[in-house]
Amino acid sequence: MNEIALPEGELTYLAEFATSLAIGLLIGLERERSPAAKAGLRTFALVAMFGTLAAMLSHKTSSPWPLVSGLLLVGSMVIASYWRKQDQLEDPGTTTVAAILVCYGLGALVWYEESALAVMLAIITTILLYFKAELQGMTRNLDRRDLISILQFAVLSFIILPILPNQNYGPFDALNPYQIWLMVVLISGVSLTGYIALRFFKQRFGVVFMGVMGGLASSTATTMVFTRRSSYNPDFANLAVIVILLANLTVLVRLALISMVISPAIFIYLLPVLGGGLLLGLMTAVFWWRELSQQQAMPMPDSKNPAELPTAVGFGLLYAVVLFFSAWLSDVAGSGGLYVVAIVSGLTDVDAITLSSLCLYGLGKLEILNAVTAITLAAIANLVFKLGMIFLIGNASLTRRCAPGMIAIMLGLGGALAVVSSSLHS
């Protein structure tokens, strides 16, 4: 019996329609749960495939009208279905109409070879539809101060930051307006995110989330924000120390992932060093976690502005000063002072010296031990800088809590480096 083989083009079309079908079923599955919704699994699946079909016809005929007409037709039909029966339902159908139109657009997006983006947007759409009650509860609990902080952060991030030049200026080309203001944005973003997480998600796993996400975004910004907040509220110190330690431990994980991708040869020797610091740091973080678990209630920061705008701008100026002196010291050290450069650059950024060391090793200009040592020194210098910042900005209670953890991480890094160094020399 002869097998029927589809042309290659038709197989591609079949895959695209299958993707749009899956998108429609995903969104329709959520809408099927709503009693007031007049569209469910079948409707959303058909609309998604109709979007792909309309986009296909527009492409084949070189005319936008099939796609535009399909959008108007789908929107009119859904609106008419709600208009015919106005029975004062709790859900007037606006959300379902919007979801239908989005589904149609996602189907069209699949045809234009943006399937990955369409799937991601479909998942986001489903999440927004599913968490209706939670989102409404959050918006009702926002007061005027919260909204002002969100608007301030939006202005900092999406109006001021994009127009700043991403170029180096000043002596030693040390001052980059974009990079300096980016630190202001990170400070405000971490502060606002932490405030919202503590206010609306008071479960204790939220502390771990804030620490890890803060470390991925900026451990320096996270350290700064929670140091300031603990100075306002002494009861906040136990929570702050956990977030700060986890953020700085996340940096070690990030460095390990960077080295694993860029230079697996160095990763073998760098992993024990970073692992030593991670192990000792986690032990202290677990200790303070148990202390926090014994508290009766999750403490809330006493903050007049959740976006911490004055603090963010002040740190941006401090960051610019540190950048200048780091560039000056690097220039004085010259090309032979690799370790000095690693220490001074590590005060503000560990990733830069890590990438530089890995690239120099890849070019054959640096030995394995030199690269591992430079990265380790940068990480230790970064921890020293943050510990000094905690001492100068925070209160004595937070300093006493953070110091053992930070020092433990530094001892773990230094001790493991000594072991790796002796093994390479032997």
Image (tube, grey):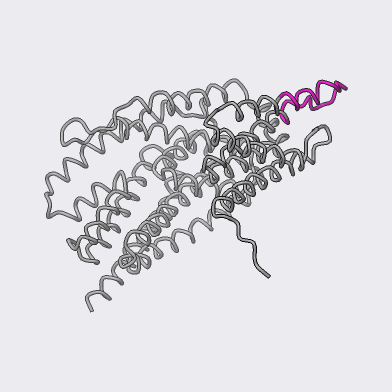
Magenta residues span 76-96
Number of numbered discs on residues: 0
Q: Residue furthest bottom?
A: 426
The residue depicted at 32 percent of the width and 35 percent of the height is 179
Residue 173 belongs to magenta span: no
Q: Residue furthest front?
A: 2
The residue depicted at 65 percent of the width and 28 percent of the height is 71
Residue 86 belongs to magenta span: yes
The residue depicted at 57 percent of the width and 42 percent of the height is 110
Q: Percent position (x, y) of residue 127?
A: 66, 40
Q: Percent position (x, y) of residue 390?
A: 39, 42
Q: Classify residue 400 as left or right of residue 106.
A: left
Q: Against 7, is 78 above or below? A: above
Q: Percent position (x, y) of residue 288?
A: 53, 53
Q: Nearer the viewer, residue 36 or 6?
A: 6
The residue depicted at 20 percent of the width and 39 percent of the height is 325
Q: Classify residue 358 as left or right of residue 185.
A: left
Q: Percent position (x, y) of residue 338?
A: 18, 55
Q: Nearer the viewer, residue 177 or 165?
A: 165
Q: Classify residue 94 as left or right of residue 383.
A: right
Q: Nearer the viewer, residue 43 or 301?
A: 43
Q: Quadrant of the C terminus?
A: bottom left
Q: Quadrant of the N terminus?
A: bottom right
User: Where on the picture, by quarter, is residue 68?
Assistant: top right
Q: Against 21, is 175 above or below? A: above
